[in-house]
């Protein structure tokens, strides 16, 4: 196997995120580039705890709840507590998304924690400060999809009220689900906008929540290819300026997208026009620092909302730059910010009139210091009695000493999540930074939270073959062992078989995805006279959850395919569930074929020399076993519809080895399969639960190509199709139905080959067995009997 060059840094974002040339992502916990000025407020009447809102993805939020009798505004629905006299008021809910250019930060960062404490105490409100998946490991729309998951979780909490299902007690006791606001700063503001737009366009049902009460955007992070005057005037060395913003868009947007992508530019082609958003778009409050490089872009956003007839208010903060509330959450400008948000959330009491269907704008100037800690205690006017104290200090915030920017470390002692107090000081303890980690390792490295009265210790939710465990806190644990090994091990092809050379190649640097290239040595670039070989793109099985091209089973079988067809075999890895649920694997297949197109279009050094010397790009086949065959089916169907990649793709054929399909209605072979058999129905159902989008059934189009929501199969455009399966496979009836339906749709170039006595995965369990040998002969006949096509046409 050839060696690869040492990976080098492609992007370095603030020293916090590094993207390497081999696709590895390194992260540091040193956030000294995001200093906290002033300190953290102490003594605020707020309790907080962490909750999991998406166990499959390991995503959390931090809920902040004001404490004490009466919560500050005199507004809201009163509900009796467990005592006969005490009354607490239901509070609005503020779902808050942190900033960080979609690439860095967490609700745990002390800056965001301090700001959320103030919002909860001084609005007052229940604040749900949420984490989401970060780029470049998870490019957009991952963050937007995670935001939908939060509202699905919150909707379930609202639906649980009064039912047999127990909602979170803090939400049940304190949340006014009729007043749910979405908010965020910078990239979090962009997320908040997309949440509001998805809800208004019907993509985000809210159920018992009914509607969003409002949307609060703190200097939203929008982009565009044409610079605005404020962007053009921004110095290139500005710490929070266009150079950093452009870099973060490169890391966060889909590969190849520009800043005019709808995820970045709400006015770009492909974006939903504001006029089409309808009445479901909530009132919007936009806070815009006038020294922000994005100042003009934010002003345009407000103007376009106004032109579309939306209720919007713009408040400009003079002399402030991007992220001032994050840098100095207890500063004077932040004092005014909280007053503005409080007025908006509580309908204008004590301030300007609430929004009334047209845009308003005003400027916030610096004010003298005001009382802070008293906010959220008293009723009505915010006044409160205090203990004996100097008049000059009464009601002012108390700051904790800070000699260096704080860091949060996964190895640090767990935070104290006791509901009776806000233990801010625990966040300020220094601890050494852990080593950088790769994207592949990141999903399993979660904070080891202390079990407490509100956080039970995590337990195993799903255990898949002992190789993968999903815990109740969202952690995913993976065993390093291969997928499945026969009892007598796996051997490579016999010594008299033609030699095969192989090496690993990265096909998607941003996601760190590789393939293993197998080339018969006689065709590995040995000269212009060598016979060009067909290309077989191969996706391994494993229920979308386990497996790799490096597993000995798949490696041995691909060696046989390369040697005995002969062919150039590209055995590809893809992102696995539950960390990456479908359609992640299908998207990765699209990226692989885009990479292959670039290889065909390259000249000289741009094309891998093994491909340049060996490959007939007019004969490209897609194939796979089990879940890999499902991927191959979707690749062929997408190619037929013109949706597989950025180029038109004409496949020479498609080879499906016992494809892993599913459905809610059981087939006879599924119902009759012994429950204690190896690779049984319970295991298949479990893998679908882990792989499908959260809440989806086995009739989802990813599982069932003929389900109620599956697109019509364009059979006439499909390439020649070879399907192979054992007649003892529990999926055999489903596979036979698939072949029959494809033929009935007009695709006569479909062949089904059944192997007597063989079950699911027979070639993986015994890649050197007689059935596997016959399978290779069948695939050889199919590959060399199909005619060449004009590949990757314009």
Image (spheres, rainbow, N blue to C red):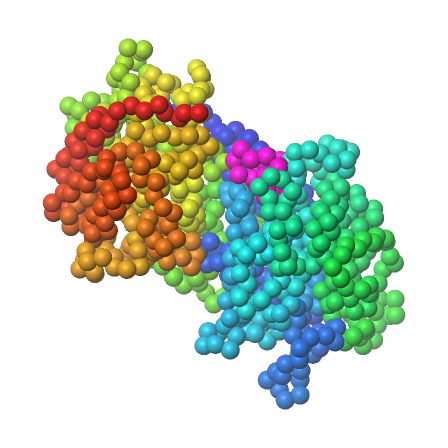
- Report the number of discs: 0
Depth check: 761 or 359 in front? 359
Position of residue 135 measured from the top left corner of the image (x, y, whole percent): 54, 43
Relative placement, left or right, of 611 versus 51 is left
Q: Is residue 273 visible?
A: yes
Q: Position of residue 759 (x, y in %)?
A: 17, 48
Q: Main secondary structure of the magenta part?
A: loop
Residue 449 vs residue 583, the one in the foreground: 583
Q: Position of residue 315 (x, y in %)?
A: 79, 53
Q: Is residue 42 left or right of residue 612?
A: right
Q: Who's the residue at 78% across and 66% down the image?
A: 348
Considering every residue shown, the one lying at the far bottom of the view is 84
Q: Any magenta on residue 252?
A: yes
Q: For this view, does 630 lie left or right of residue 122? A: left
Is there any visible trace of residue 427 in the rendered image? no
User: In the rendered view, would you say 372 is above or below 702?
Assistant: below
- Vertical side of 124 occupied by 670: above or below: above
Q: Quadrant of the C terminus?
A: top left
Magenta residues (range): 247-265
57 in relation to 346, above or below: above
Q: Is residue 251 magenta?
A: yes
Residue 769 placement: quadrant = top left
Quarter residue 65 falls in: bottom right
Q: Residue at x 71, y 54 (%)?
A: 309
Q: Position of residue 527 (x, y in %)?
A: 31, 11
Nearer-the-camera pick, 201 or 764: 201
Give the position of the N terminus as an image quadrant: top left
User: Looking at the image, which residue is at 28% across and 60% down?
Assistant: 665
Q: Residue at x 57, y 54 (%)?
A: 201
């Amino acid at each position: 196997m050839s060696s690869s060059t040492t990976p080098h840094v492609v992007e370095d974002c603030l020293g916090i995120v590094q993207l390497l040339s081999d696709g590895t992502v390194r992260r540091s916990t040193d956030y000294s580039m995001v200093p906290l000025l002033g300190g953290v407020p102490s003594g605020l009447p707020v309790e907080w705890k962490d909750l999991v809102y998406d166990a499959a993805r390991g995503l959390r939020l931090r809920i902040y709840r004001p404490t004490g009798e009466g919560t500050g505004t005199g507004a809201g629905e009163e509900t009796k507590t467990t005592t006969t006299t005490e009354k607490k008021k239901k509070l609005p809910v503020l779902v808050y998304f942190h900033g960080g250019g979609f690439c860095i930060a967490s609700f745990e960062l002390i800056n965001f924690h301090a700001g959320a404490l103030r919002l909860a105490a001084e609005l007052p409100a229940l604040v749900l400060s949420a984490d989401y998946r970060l780029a470049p490991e998870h490019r957009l729309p991952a963050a937007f999809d995670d935001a939908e998951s939060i509202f699905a979780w919150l909707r379930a909490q609202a639906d649980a009220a009064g039912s047999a299902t127990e909602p979170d007690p803090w939400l049940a006791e304190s949340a006014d689900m009729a007043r749910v606001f979405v908010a965020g700063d910078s990239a979090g503001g962009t997320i908040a906008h997309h949440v509001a737009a998805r809800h208004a366009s019907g993509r985000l049902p809210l159920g018992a929540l009914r509607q969003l009460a409002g949307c609060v955007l703190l200097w939203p992070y929008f982009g565009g290819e044409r610079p605005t005057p404020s962007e053009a005037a921004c110095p290139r060395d500005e710490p929070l300026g266009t150079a950093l913003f452009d870099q973060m868009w490169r890391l966060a947007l889909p590969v190849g997208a520009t800043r005019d992508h709808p995820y970045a530019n709400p006015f770009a082609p492909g974006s939903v026009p504001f006029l089409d958003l309808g009445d479901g778009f909530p009132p919007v409050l936009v806070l815009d620092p006038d020294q922000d490089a994005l100042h003009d872009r934010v002003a345009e956003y407000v103007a376009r909302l106004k032109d579309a007839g939306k209720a919007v208010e713009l408040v400009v903060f003079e002399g402030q730059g991007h992220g001032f509330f994050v840098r100095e959450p207890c500063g004077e400008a932040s004092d005014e910010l909280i007053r503005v948000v409080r007025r908006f959330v509580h309908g204008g009491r004590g301030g300007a009139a609430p929004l009334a269907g047209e845009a308003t704008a005003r400027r916030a100037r610096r004010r003298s210091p005001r009382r802070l800690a008293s906010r959220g205690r008293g009723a009505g006017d915010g006044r409160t009695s205090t203990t004996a104290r100097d008049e000059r200090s009464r009601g002012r915030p108390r700051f904790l000493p800070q000699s260096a920017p704080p860091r949060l470390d996964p190895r640090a002692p767990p935070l104290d999540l006791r509901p009776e107090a806000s233990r801010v000081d625990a966040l300020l303890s220094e601890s050494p930074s852990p080593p950088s980690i790769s994207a592949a390792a990141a999903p399993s490295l979660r904070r080891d939270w202390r079990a407490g009265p509100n956080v039970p210790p995590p337990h195993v939710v799903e255990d898949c073959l002992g190789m993968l465990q999903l815990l109740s806190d969202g952690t995913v644990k993976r065993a390093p062992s291969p997928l499945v090994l026969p009892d007598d091990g796996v051997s490579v092809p016999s010594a008299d078989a033609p030699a095969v050379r192989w090496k690993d190649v990265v096909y998607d640097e941003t996601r760190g995805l590789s393939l293993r290239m197998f080339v018969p040595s006689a065709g590995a670039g040995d000269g212009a006279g060598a016979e060009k070989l067909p290309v077989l793109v191969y996706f391994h099985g494993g229920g979308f959850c386990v497996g790799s091209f490096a597993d000995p089973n798949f490696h041995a079988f691909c060696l046989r395919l390369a040697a005995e067809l002969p062919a150039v075999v590209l055995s590809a890895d893809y992102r696995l569930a539950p960390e990456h649920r479908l359609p992640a694997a299908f998207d990765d297949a699209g990226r692989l074929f885009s990479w292959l197109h670039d290889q065909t279009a390259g000249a000289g050094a741009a094309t891998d020399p093994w491909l340049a010397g060996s490959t007939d790009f007019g004969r490209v086949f897609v194939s796979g076993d089990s879940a890999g065959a499902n991927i191959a089916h979707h690749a062929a169907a997408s190619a037929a519809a013109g949706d597989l990649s950025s180029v038109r793709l004409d496949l020479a054929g498609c080879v499906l080895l016992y494809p892993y399909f599913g459905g809610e209605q059981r087939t006879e072979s599924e119902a009759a399969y012994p429950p204690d058999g190896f690779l049984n129905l319970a295991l298949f159902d479990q893998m679908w639960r882990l792989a499908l989008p959260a809440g989806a059934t086995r009739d989802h189009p990813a599982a069932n190509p003929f389900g109620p929501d599956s697109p019509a199969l364009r059979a006439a455009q499909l390439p020649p199709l070879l399907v192979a399966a054992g007649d003892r496979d529990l999926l055999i009836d489903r596979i036979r139905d698939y072949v029959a339906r494809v033929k009935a749709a007009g695709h006569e170039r479909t062949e089904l080959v059944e192997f007597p006595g063989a079950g699911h995965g027979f070639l993986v369990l015994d890649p050197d067995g007689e059935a596997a040998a016959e399978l290779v002969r069948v695939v050889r006949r199919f590959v060399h009997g199909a005619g060449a096509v004009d590949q990757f046409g314009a």
